[in-house]
């Protein structure tokens, strides 16, 4: 059995059928139990999952980090995966690296996805993921650019992350004037919203 086929079989055993994993948030209880019993097998299979660019393999490293069960060379494994990752997979690998190291610089690959991914769903995912990192000048700029994105939901999520960084827990829904700016079709209003949000964080 080749590595990809072995990974798919093991993935089903640990996380369930693909249609269920897609429909629901993946559950990591089985993974944690397996890591306690057979850590080398788990590491080998997760390496295979990363080689297949499977997002759930990257998320598994985040779960193992939270449980204190990550492989000793997890950072090296993930850095190698990140070097060839793109899209949603790149976001999940960067999140796993942050979970392991707490180095906020791992937000930068996600910011790159936010400003460069062709898929609006992936850009949306990146805007949401950045909320889990501390703000920085570079991230604020990337999210401000995303507030001017052609797609409304990307603008919304980027604005929401910026508001929450500014201490506004109500988010976009609690800021009607700002919401109106990013909802409308006028690009000038999007620019005004981006400038307003940047100013809040640069006071």
Image (tube, grey):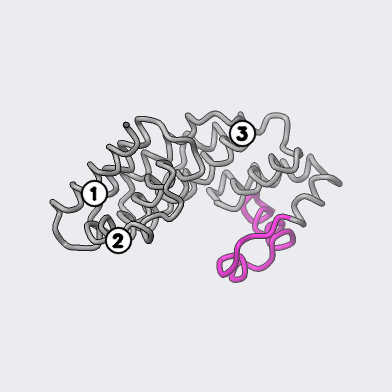
Furthest residue toward right: 37
> Is 92 left or right of 13, judged from the image as shown?
left
Q: Residues within 10 Å of mark 3 (few under 14, many from 20)?
A: some
Quadrant occupied by the C terminus: top left
Residue bounds of the magenta highlight: 1-28
Give me the C-alpha separation between circle 2 and circle 3. 45 Å
> Is 110 left or right of 9, judged from the image as shown?
left
Q: Residues within 10 Å of mark 1 (few under 14, many from 20)?
A: many
Residue designated by label 2: 176
Element type at marker 3? helix
Image marks 1 and 3: residues in contact by CB distance under 8 Å: no
Which label belongs to residue 193? 1
Please tell me whether the stretch drawn in magenta is mainly helix, strand or loop.
Answer: helix
Query: Can you say whether 104 is above or below 47 in the image?
Result: above
Element type at marker 1? helix
Pointer 2 or 1: first along the chain? 2
Give me the C-alpha separation between circle 2 and circle 1. 12 Å
**Residue drawn where x is 38% and y is 39% of the image:** 111
Q: Is residue 93 visible?
A: yes
Element type at marker 2? helix
């Amino acid at each position: 059995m080749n590595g990809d086929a072995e990974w798919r079989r093991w993935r089903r055993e640990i996380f369930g059928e693909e249609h269920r994993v897609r429909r629901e948030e993946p559950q990591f209880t089985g993974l944690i139990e397996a890591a306690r019993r057979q850590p080398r097998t788990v590491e080998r299979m997760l390496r295979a999952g990363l080689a297949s660019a499977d997002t759930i393999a990257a998320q598994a490293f985040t779960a193992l980090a939270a449980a204190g069960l990550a492989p000793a060379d997890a950072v090296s494994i993930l850095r190698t995966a990140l070097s060839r990752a793109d899209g949603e997979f790149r976001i999940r690998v960067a999140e796993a690296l942050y979970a392991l190291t707490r180095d906020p610089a791992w937000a930068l690959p996600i910011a790159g996805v936010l400003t460069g991914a062709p898929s609006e769903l992936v850009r949306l995912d990146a805007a949401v993921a950045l909320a889990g990192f501390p703000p920085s000048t570079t991230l604020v700029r990337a999210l401000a650019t995303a507030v001017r994105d052609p797609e409304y939901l990307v603008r919304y999520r980027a604005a929401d992350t910026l508001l929450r960084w500014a201490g506004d827990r109500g988010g976009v829904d609690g800021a009607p004037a700002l919401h109106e700016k990013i909802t409308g079709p006028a690009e000038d209003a999007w620019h005004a919203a981006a400038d307003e949000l940047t100013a809040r964080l640069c006071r």
